[in-house]
Image (cartoon, helix red, strand yellow):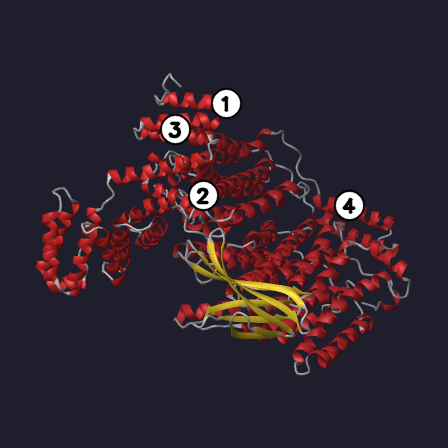
Amino acid sequence: MTFFWIVAALMTAAACFAVIWPFLRPSDDAEAGHDVEVYRDQLAEVDRDLTRGAISPAEAEEAKAEIGRRILRAAESESAAASRAEGRLTRVAATLAILFVPVMGLGGYLYLGSPAVPDQALAARLATNPSENSIDELIARAERHLFENPQDGRGWDVLAPIYLRVGRAEDAVIAFRNTIRLNGTNAAREAGLGDALFRVAGSVVTAEAREAFERAMELDRSDPRARFFLALALAQQGDTERAANRWRAMYEELPEDSPWRGTIVQALARVQEDPSQQQARGPSAQDVEAAAELSQEDRAAMIGGMVAQLDERLRDNPHDAAGWQRLIRSYSVLGRADDARAALRRGIDGLGIESAAAAELVAFAAGFGIELPESQ
Amino acid sequence: MTVEIGHFALVLAFALAIVQATVPLLGARLGNARLMATAAPTAMAGFALVTLSFCALVAAYVASDFSVANVWQNSHSLKPMLYKVTGTWGNHEGSMLLWVLILVLFGALVALFSGNLPATLRANVLAVQGWIGAAFLLFILATSNPFARLTPAPIEGRDLNPVLQDIGLAVHPPLLYLGYVGFSISFSFAVAALIEGRIDAAWARWVRPWVLAAWIFLTGGIAMGSYWAYYELGWGGFWFWDPVENASFMPWLAGTALLHSALVMERRSALKIWTVLLAILTFSLSLLGTFLVRSGVLTSVHAFATDPARGVFILIILSIFIGGALSLFALRASELKAGGVFQPISREGALVLNNLFLSTATATVLIGTLYPLAIEALTGDKISVGAPFFNLTFGLLMVPLLLIVPFGPLLAWKRGDLAAVSQRLFAALGIGLVVALASFLFVDRVSVFAASGCGLAAWLIAGSMTDLAQKSGYPKVGAGVAMRRLAGLPGAAFGTVLAHAGLGVTLLGLVSVTALEVERFVTMKPGETLEVAGRVLTFEGMTPLRGANFVEDQARFSIAGADGKSLGDIASSKRVYTARRMPTTEAGIRTFGFSQLYVSLGDPTDDGGVVVRAWWKPNVTLIWLGAVVVMIGGGFSLADRRLRVGAPAARRKRTERPA
C-alpha cells in the first residue's frame, strides 16, 4: 500500500508538471500571420506540382491567382494580436489550475477508490497453500482439477458432499453420480445422491431419490441419512404414523452425540404439530443442513483431499521442486510431521540427491522444523 | 495494486481534462500565450493517464482478478486469452473507457501535430476536446466505474455474453469508436471556429483529413459489424435496420456529406457555414448513437446494462453539447465570411446536390429510428418501423443519388458542362444497360429489381472508372502512355474512383442477395440430402465436441456439385456456454467465388433429425468487399497530402462557357 501511494504521488507530480510546463519555458513570440503562411506554403506546392508535371502551366496560373486572391483577403483581416503582458488574472488562473489537479485527483480517488484492496489474480490465489484458501477457493481448485482430470474418482468423492453442504444441489447430483460411476457404490454415496436429488426437487423425496436411499439401505442397514429420508418419504406420502414410528426407533438406536437426533426431534415435532401441512412441504431441508453444516472436520477432510491430490501428482512428476515445497509445508501446517518427513525424503530422491534443488528443499523443510534422521 | 493505480490514473485524467477545458479557453480570451500553451501538454498527459488506466483494466481481465466487479461480471477464468482481452470492452464500463481512450488519443494527436495552427485556434480546439473528455470521464467515474471492487472476491466470473466471444469483438468496437470519436475532432474545430468567430484556410486543411480518417474507420466498423451479425447471429441477415445499426449509420451518412462539403471548402473556400453545421451535426449524431445504445432505451446485444441513471446522465451530456454547439452556431454563424461563388452546374453544385440527398437520407433514418421511441414514450404503444419503411424511403432517396454519382467527379470546378460530361459517360451508360439486359435475360426473367439494380451497380462502377480513363487519355493515346499517365496521377484521383466504384460493388452484392437468394428449411436425418441452388448437401451426422468454455453438437455436411463432384464440407453447430448456460448457433459458411453457402442448425426433432436452414447467397461477400474498396479509396485520398486549391479547370477551353 505504501508503494501504491508512492506511485500515486509520482503520477500526481507528473500531471502537475504537465500544467506548469508552459510557465517554466521562456515566452516565445506571439503568433504571426498564420493564414498567410499557409497560403505561402500552397504557392510553393503549386510550383512543385508544376515542375513534377502533375499540373499544366495553365492550371498552375489559375491556382496561383486563386491563392493570391485569398492572401489579399487574409491580409485585410489579419489583426496583429500581440500577446499581452501577464496580468494578475493569469497568475491566479495558473495557480488555481496547478492546485486543482492534486486536490481533485486525490480527493476524487479517496472518495471513489479502495487503496487498501490488493490485486487478486486468480492464478495467484489458487497457487497458495490449500490451508490458507477460503471454502470457495477450495471448491474452485477442486473444480479446476476435475475439469482437467474428469476421471479422478477421488476428486469427485471429496467434492460431492461439499457441494451438498454449500447448497449447490444440482452440482452435487452430478458429482455423486460421477463418484459412484468411478469408485463404485457405497451407502454414504447413495444416500448423498438421494439427499442431493431431494434438494433439487425442492425438498421432496422423489421416486428417484427414494431408490437411491433404498440402495444405500441395502448396502448398510444402519445408514442414518437413508433411514431418515425413507421415513420422510412415508411422511410426505401421508403415512405420518409409520414415519414417526421409524424416527422414534431410529432415535433410540442412534448414539448420544449424533447430529441426526436433533433433526429427528424437530421432524417429529412438526409431524405431530400439523400433519396436513407436513404433507405439502418438506420440513427438514433446513434441519438437514443444520445437522450437516460444514464443520471444522469437514474442512480438514477437504484440505486433506487437496493435499493427497498434490501428493499423488508428485508421484507422477517428482521433478517439481515448488510442488515438493508446497507439499512439505501443507503437511507441516496440518501437523502431519511424519508425512512431511516422508515427503522430504521422496522429494530428495525425485530431485536427485546431489542436486541444488534438493539442497534447497532440505533448507526449506528445516524452516518448518522438518529434518531427516541422521541415518539417511 | 495495478487496479488501484488504474483507478487513480482515471481520476487524475479527469482533473487534467478540466484544466484542459478551462485554462486554454481563458488564455485564448485574454490573449495570453502561456495559458493557451497548457492545452497541448495537458492533452498529452491526459492521454498517457487514460492509457495507463485502460491497460490496468486489461491486466485485471487477463489475470482474472475477480475482485474487480467489472471483471467478475464479464469474464471467466476458462475463457480463451483473446476473449479475456477483448472482453475488456465487451461491456458497458469497459467500452466507455475505450471510447474515452480513443477520444484522448485523438486529442493528443491534435496536440502533437498542431504546431502550425494559429495559437488561439489550437487552444480552443483542445479546450473543446477537454470538455468532451471531462464530461465522459465524469460519466464513467460517477455512473459506470470499471474499477469498482468486490470484497471478498468471488472465485469465478459470470462469463462474457457468448455472442460476443468472437474475433469480431476485437475489431468491430475499436473501429466503430475510432469513427465515432474521430468526428469529435471536426466538432471541436467547428466549435472553436464559432468561438473565435472566424474560419481561415488552416481550418479546412485541418478538418478534412480528420473527417476522412474517421469516416474510413466508421465505414470499416459498420461493415465489420454487419459481417459479424451475418455469421454469428445465425439467420443469415446482414442489415436489420435495427435502431443500434441506424445509430452508427446516421453519423456515417452525415459524415459522408461532411467529407464532400469539406472538400468544397478546402478547395474553393465555399460552403463554410454549412460545413461547420455538418461537423456539429455529425458528432451530435455520434453522441445520439452513444445515448441510444448505452442508455437502455433500446434492448439489443449492444445494450449491456440498463440503468436509468446512466441514460439521464448521457442525455444531459447530449443536451449540453448539441444544444450548446447549435446555440453558438445560431449566434455566430452570421459572422463567418461566406466563400467563393459558383454556378449550379459545377463540381460544387454536384457536391451540394450530394449533400442535399445525404442529409435528407440521414433525416429519414433519424425519423425512422426515433419515431417508434417517441410513440412508446408518449402512448406506451410499441410500434415497429422496420425494413419496409426504410427500403421505401431510404432506398428511393439512394437511387437518384447513385445515378448522379459518376457525374460529380467529371464536372469542372466553378463552372461545368453537363452535356460534355454526359457525352463522356455514354460508354458507362452502355455497360450499365447491357448488364441490366443480361441479368434480365440470363439470370432472372421475373425480377425487374434485380435487373435494374445490377444495371445501376454496373453504371456506378463503369462511371467511376470513366474518370480514370479520361485522365489517362485512354483509348485515344496508347495503353503504354495511359499507364504512365495513371501512375503520375495524384492519390486523391484514385481515392474518388475507388470510393465510388466500391459503392457499386456493395450495391451489386446487396441486389444479388436480396433478389436471387435461395433458402431451404427442412428437417434432416443423417444420410439425407438437400439440394440448394445446384449444390447437394449430405448430412453426415452430429458429433458432440468440447471447447474451452462450451460444449457443442456439431453437424457435418458434405457438399457436392450437381455433377456429383465433391466440393468439400461444411460444419454448423449448436453450442452451450457452460458458465451462463446460454445456447448459441454457429453457422457453417463456405465461400464459392463471391457467393456463399450458409448452413444454420435449428432444434433437434424427436425422431433423431435436426432442423436445418440452408441458404445460397449469391455475391454476398461483395457487400463487404465493396466497403473494403471504399476504405482503400479513402486511404488513397488520405495519403495524398498535396495542398489542394480548387481553381477552375482550363483544360478544355472549348467546353468553357461564359459564367
Q: Helix, strand or loop at disc 2?
A: loop
* Dot 4 and dot 3 residues touching (CB under 8 Å): no
Q: Residues within 10 Å of mark 4 (few under 14, many from 20)?
A: some
Q: CA distance from mark 4 to mark 2?
A: 57 Å
Residue at numbered disc 3: A343
Amino acid, disc 1: Ser
Q: Chain of mark 4?
A: A
Residue at numbered disc 1: A355
- Residue drawn at (54%, 48%), measured in percent from left and top? B82
Amino acid, disc 4: Arg
* Dot 4 and dot 2 residues touching (CB under 8 Å): no
Nearer-the-camera pick, A139 or A97? A139
Q: Helix, strand or loop at disc 3?
A: helix
Q: Position of residue B344 (x, y in %)?
A: 73, 69
Q: Does A334 sit left or right of B542 as displayed? A: left
Q: Are marks 3 and 1 on the same chain?
A: yes
Q: Position of residue A180 (x, y in %)?
A: 33, 51
Nearer-the-camera pick, B376 or B332? B376
Q: Chain of mark 2?
A: B
The residue lying furthest to the bottom in this view is: B446
Q: Position of residue B429 (x, y in %)?
A: 78, 74
Q: Of label 4 and label 1, which has the lower sequence position?
A: 4
Nearer-the-camera pick, B410 or A359? A359
Residue at numbered disc 2: B64
Q: CA distance from mark 3 to mark 1?
A: 16 Å
